[in-house]
Amino acid sequence: MFRPEQRVLPPKVMVFDWHGTLVDTHDAMFSAMEDMLPQLEELGLVEQLLPEDACRTEDDARLVRYIRIYRRLHPRILAERRVSRTDIFNAIFGDNVPAKRIAHHAYNQAYRKYFGKVKPFQPGAREYLSALKAAGIKLAVSTNRNREFLDKELQILDNGRWLDLFDATVCADDVTEYKPDPQVILKALEKLGLPANQHAWYVGDSYIDMLTAHRAGVAGIFYNGACWDPERIASWFTRRDGPAAVVDSFEALMDLLVELQARQPDVFSASLASVRPAPFPPPERPEPRIEPDWHPAVVRLIRPAVILFDWHATLVDTLDAMYHAVDDMLPDFHHLGLMSRMVAPEDSKTPEDARLVAYVREFAKLHPKVKADRKISRTDIFEVLFGEDQEAKQIAHKAFNHHYRNHYGTVKAFEPRVREMLEGLRRLGIQVGVITNRDREFFEHELAAVEEVGWTSLFNVDVCGDDTPLRKPHPDQLLLAVQKLDYPPDPSVWYVGDSTTDIIAAKRAGMTAVFFNGAQWDLPWLNRIFPGTHKHPDKPDVVVNDFSEFWALVLACEIGPP
């Protein structure tokens, strides 16, 4: 806990945030977010996402990038379960109030399917609140939740035993703006007939809560129930807008109040020592996400003389066009005779693959979860569906191309500084190329269109899907690329790609396989898609999560061992 400073004044009223402070509604919240985010395109909000260079932190910039590409929450957020939808909307839309209003409305529509899953955030929360009330401190709730949800959750929580705890509640639809606008706090104080000053505390679990408290002119008390490291919390705030104190539990909050009462014994109407409950345990620290750890010692990687890149979902983002074309293509499988050529369930690599095959066979479309995840390419889809049936895959690729002509054209760099990274590799004397299963008519258009000026001059070689008889995961395309460069296919040629088919192609070509984990798979999932079994032996030589990690890897190989 941060030690209270002299400016921390004893509270006459404590206004609480709801979710993440008093209660845990993470299951419902994240379910609603995962329903809402795939709607960003139809809501017109993709174009409203904050530019990455305008984001407040690097984490926010990564979140914007991930949502722009995959239309879902970053896996680390889902694993840690530490942030609210308000935090997310403020991170990705900044001060764009109309965009946030649309997003909140869409979220509320989705939340109606899930709300009611509510429990105290930490053990003893009601007992601690009862002690505060017994000490004469007014209690209120100010939340971005809509009234219909808060009232229902209050009725459900502990069988309604929280209903009489609060002297006032204010919800988002009781005011005109969402937090960080201070209206939700000011209206609660108005209801209680109390001024907005440092004797009013706003207790919340996020940066947005503290910003809201600062704008309302009240004392912000940061409730660190999510167990953030102190250094991380300190990095969010300036001296001007930082919290008056940070507490890790309601027991620590009581300790703070006891210390204030020791300075002014008559500040509360009862002795806190006489009304506080026996100590309850603090909130449990969230389970950490298991990050990929496939970074071998750099000295084991051969310095690259040639680096070949996959195109889609590695260097550039063309997911919107790709998924639209897949949607249009799959019903054609009936008259193309492809339904009967799909692999048998027992031949699938994973249970997830078997389910994908079964769903496409029955419904002639992708499962909604596959579309929501946006993490699998058409090449991977065809590998899952048809296995080693090269003829079936060629028919499927041709059908895809027919529909892709109706959608392609919009292409964005996967990360903001991809061009600078490619130029930097060339300055190091490394030859750079692209290998893509995209047909040349599409690739050349996209190559000229990316970033409006095109990347045509950045590559020494490119090989497209229709340049060789067989596409990835067959190694023909990679072998043709090094043949064009008059360079041997050996481990000094790196192939960087985001899919299992990319890794299989690189290993079969005898090259160094670099898995670009832009989709942010965790280690357990990577071990599932690269099992290293006799039937599926191919594994990446290294995993990088973004191009800053990749650049550091290349430079380390440039420097070599000490």
Image (cartoon, rainbow, N blue to C red):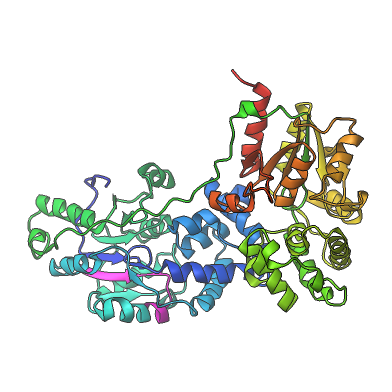
Q: Residue furthest top?
A: 562
Position of residue 107 in the picture relative to residue 279 (left or right): right
Q: Position of residue 108 (x, y in %)?
A: 50, 76
| Residue toward you, 446 or 504 | 504
Quarter assignment of residue 141: bottom left
| Residue toward you, 71 or 500 | 500
Work out whether residue 456 can be spotted: no
Q: Looking at the rendering, in which quadrant would you find the C terminus?
A: top right
Q: Residue at x 40, y 57 (%)?
A: 206
Position of residue 450 in the picture relative to residue 118 (left or right): right
Position of 331 relative to 460 (above/below): below
Residue 143 counted in the magenta span: yes
Residue 549 counted in the magenta span: no
Q: Residue at x 45, y 71 (%)?
A: 28
Quarter assignment of residue 356: bottom right
Position of residue 532 in the picture relative to residue 100 (left or right): right
Q: Residue at x 83, y 42 (%)?
A: 478
| Residue toward you, 338 or 95 | 338
Q: Position of residue 89 (x, y in %)?
A: 53, 62
Position of 417 relative to 335 (above/below): above
Task: Please provide the residue range marked out in magenta.
Answer: 138-150
Q: Position of residue 203 (x, y in %)?
A: 31, 60
Work out whether residue 381 can be spotted: yes
Q: Position of residue 498 (x, y in %)?
A: 70, 49
Position of residue 311 in the picture relative to residue 201 (left or right): right
Position of 341 relative to 449 (above/below): below
